[in-house]
Structure formats: structure tokens, C-alpha cells
Image (cartoon, rainbow, N blue to C red):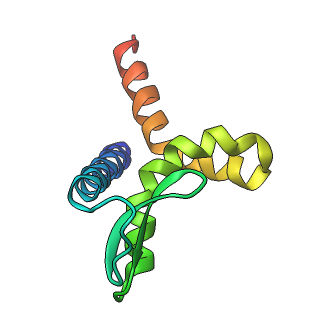
Amino acid sequence: MSTLVRRLCWSYLLLALVSIAITVLIGFTTEYGVRAPAGCNLNDALVIGVECRGFAGSSIATLFLNWPLFLIYGPLFAFSSAVIAIAALLLWAPPIYLIVDRLLRLHAT
């Protein structure tokens, strides 16, 4: 069970890194301020994020590409709402589990 949870946590982090890489690629390959009718581009409304539109699954792509940003913005805005605080804790649960698991294995007697 423990190895399954560890693998899932590592998969979670790997998907976050893939999302970050795609977001950076979008930032380097799209022109700033131009809103294409279909595709993804960076959006700098109140906080920076990625906005996708004009194709099937654009809302899922937007969610996936903004997920690492939620890891950053969640704790910053957690003071404003209990729902955001709970969501931030759930988003940070896999990395925290990996850290605690590693520390427990290092200091096991």
C-alpha cells in the first residue's frame, strides 16, 4: 500500500512538472496580448494564468495548465476562505506525504 501511495504521489509531481513545462512553452510561443479564437495563451488578469478556448476540452486544458499555479496561489489566498484553505491542503498533500515518508524512512531505528 505504501509503495502504491508513493508512486501516486510521484505521478502527481510528474504531472505538475509536465503542466509547468507546457505552460512555459505556451508563454514562449504565443504572442502577448493577442487572443486567438482557438488555442491557449497566458492571461494576466488579477493573477497570471493560462486561458484556453475554442476547442473541445478547453476547460480541462485550462484546469490542467493552471493546476501548478493553484499550488502557489492556494496558500497565498487561503486566509480568505476555508474552502480555499482546504483545497490548498489537499493540493499539497502528495508532496507533504513524500517529504514525511522520506524523513520517517531516514530516521527509522
Viewer-proximal residue, 26 or 79? 26
Number of dots carrying numbers:
0
Please name the residue shown 44% across and 58% down the image.
66
Which picture quadrant has residue 19? bottom left
Q: In the rendering, at what x and y percent does residue 13 appear?
A: 33, 46
- Above or below: residue 108 compared with residue 85: above
Which picture quadrant has residue 109? top left
Which picture quadrant has residue 57? bottom left
Left or right: 72 as drawn, with respect to 50: right
Please name the residue shown 35% across and 65% down the image.
41
- Above or below: residue 47 compared with residue 102: below
Viewer-proximal residue, 14 or 1? 14
Whether residue 17 appears in this view of the structure is yes
Left or right: 34 as drawn, with respect to 82: left
Left or right: 34 as drawn, with respect to 79: left
Whether residue 1 appears in this view of the structure is no
Q: In the rendering, at what x and y percent does residue 3 appear?
A: 31, 44
Viewer-proximal residue, 58 or 30? 30
Please name the residue shown 40% across and 12% down the image.
107
Q: In the rendering, at what x and y percent does residue 21 appear?
A: 24, 50
